[in-house]
Amino acid sequence: QSRICLLHYLAFTSVSTNNNTTMEALTQTVSTAIRTSDYPALSLVFTSQWQSLGQGEQRTLAAHFIKSAVAASSTFFPAAFQSQTILSVITATLDHLPPIVEGAADNTLRQLLFEYKVNEEDDYSTAARILSGVRMETTDTSSVYYMSPIERCDVFVKVAECYLEEDLTVEAEGAVTKAGTIIENSGITFVKNEDDDENNNNGDDDDGNNKKKNKTDEQTMTLLLRYKSTYARILDANRKFLPAATKYHDLSTAYLYTDAIEEDDLLVMLGKAITCAILSPNSAQRQR
């Protein structure tokens, strides 16, 4: 019995050693392939060679690829995004991730690929699906995946904007609804511009704080305007003309809160509000 146990132990040790050796070899292959932009080598690793690994090791190897690729993004990307081989590797690795990737590198990769799809290929629906997979922690501020309400809202508005570019209103509405929920739960709202003279009466430290506050308010307003504009376009596309008219009218009065919108754009929003009101069914709210 002791001999059988010893044989089992030796067999287990041998398998474990072989797995470690294989893992080390594959990790080195991935690092070298990224450094030399060897796309076939990366494809071979993540299609057949890593099948011999356990699920945990696959996740570790996937995380290694993503961290290494992001770290070498200045040389590896964006050229790698032009290769269907690498896009398949990225898809495979993003589907086999551990609970945490150091530095949230997977989110960084999604953002890089999102920007490439939008700016270089005008592939908005694919870009939206990629960004939708971003991991967002809402409560644990120490997590690498933590995002503030503004940051999370921005993700969903971007997704909705991309879907709208390809007239995918159902998907766009789902994303903008999530953004709306964040806005409502977080109490994010328009804040009127403060009087410049009032700001000038403060000391140097207060001036610095006010500048930071005004900058934050400006970013928030820009996001709210994008959200309202996207929501209005979705309602309009879905022939919900009366609520669309209300949203467009709200946008046409944005000059009360910010100077970020050109006067001509405000007139365009007002014109759309009038058009949607005319197209809406007759009602007391329409008359108002």
Image (cartoon, helix red, strand yellow):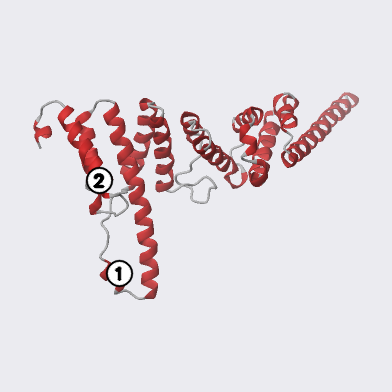
Which of the 4 image quadrants contains residue 266? top left
Residue closer to the observer: 99 or 116: 116
Counting from the top left corner in percent of width and height, residue 89 is at: 65, 30
Going from N to C along the chain, the mark reached first, 1 or 2, is: 1
Image: 166 above or below 105: above
In which quadrant will I find the C terminus?
A: top left
Which of the 4 image quadrants contains residue 246? top left
Q: What element carries label 1?
A: helix
Foreground label between 1 and 2: 2
Residue closer to the observer: 179 or 128: 128
User: Going 52% across and 45% down the picture, which residue do you hit?
Assistant: 145
Crowding at dot 1, Cα within 10 Å, few <14 / some 14-19 / many 20+, comes out as few
Q: Residue furthest right?
A: 3
Residue closer to the observer: 12 or 192: 192
Q: What element carries label 2?
A: helix
Residue 70 in view of the camera: yes
Crowding at dot 2, Cα within 10 Å, few <14 / some 14-19 / many 20+, comes out as some
Counting from the top left corner in percent of width and height, residue 124 is at: 46, 32
Which of the 4 image quadrants contains residue 282? top left
User: Going 68% across and 37% down the picture, which residue do you hit?
Assistant: 60
Counting from the top left corner in percent of width and height, residue 93 is at: 63, 32
Measure how far apart labels 1 and 2 are at the Cα level: 27 Å
Dot 1 and dot 2 residues touching (CB under 8 Å): no
Q: Mark 1 points at which residue?
A: 199
Q: Mark 2 points at which residue?
A: 266
In which quadrant will I find the N terminus?
A: top right
